[in-house]
Image (cartoon, grey):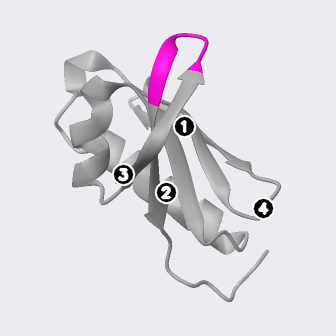
Amino acid sequence: MAERSGQILGFCVVLSRPDGDADLEGLFVEPAIWKHGTGRRLVEEAENVAASHGAQWLYAIGNAKAEGFYQACHFEHVGVQQTRFGPGLTMRKRLPVNSAKP
């Protein structure tokens, strides 16, 4: 979660996948502070959490409007997945090897 002066600015959730990798779920940043680095910092923290649990890849499903953001965070487009909101872009990012599991 990202906050300032007690106000929540954004959040995300990292979920383990059956294959040992991780999903970045529910990434949200208040629109008023987009393009100020909050989303990128949340993604970096999600990467750290996923890697610390042994994940090799972090996956995200986003809409086409978010593709540029994920590409700027070094995710690659690997497909399209149907969601309850319509088609979503499947993106993934290779995580650094982290031998320090919790």
Residue at label 1? 12
Residue at label 2? 45
Q: Which of marks 1 and 2 is nearer the N terminus?
A: 1
**Residue at the (22%, 28%) spot, across then down:** 34
Q: Earlier in the sequence, mark 1 or mark 4?
A: 1
| Residue 7 visible in the picture | no
Measured along the vertical axis of the image, is residue 55 above or below residue 11? below
Relative to 72, 1 lies left or right: right
Q: Give residue 59's position: percent from left, percent from top.
A: 54, 50
Q: Give residue 26's position: percent from left, percent from top.
A: 55, 29
Residue at label 3? 41
**Residue at the (83%, 55%) spot, across then down:** 18
- Please state which amino acid type lies under the numbered disc 1: Cys
Q: Give residue 47's position: percent from left, percent from top.
A: 51, 61
Q: Nearer the viewer, mark 4 or mark 2?
A: 4
Residue at label 4? 19
- Please state which amino acid type lies under the numbered disc 2: Glu
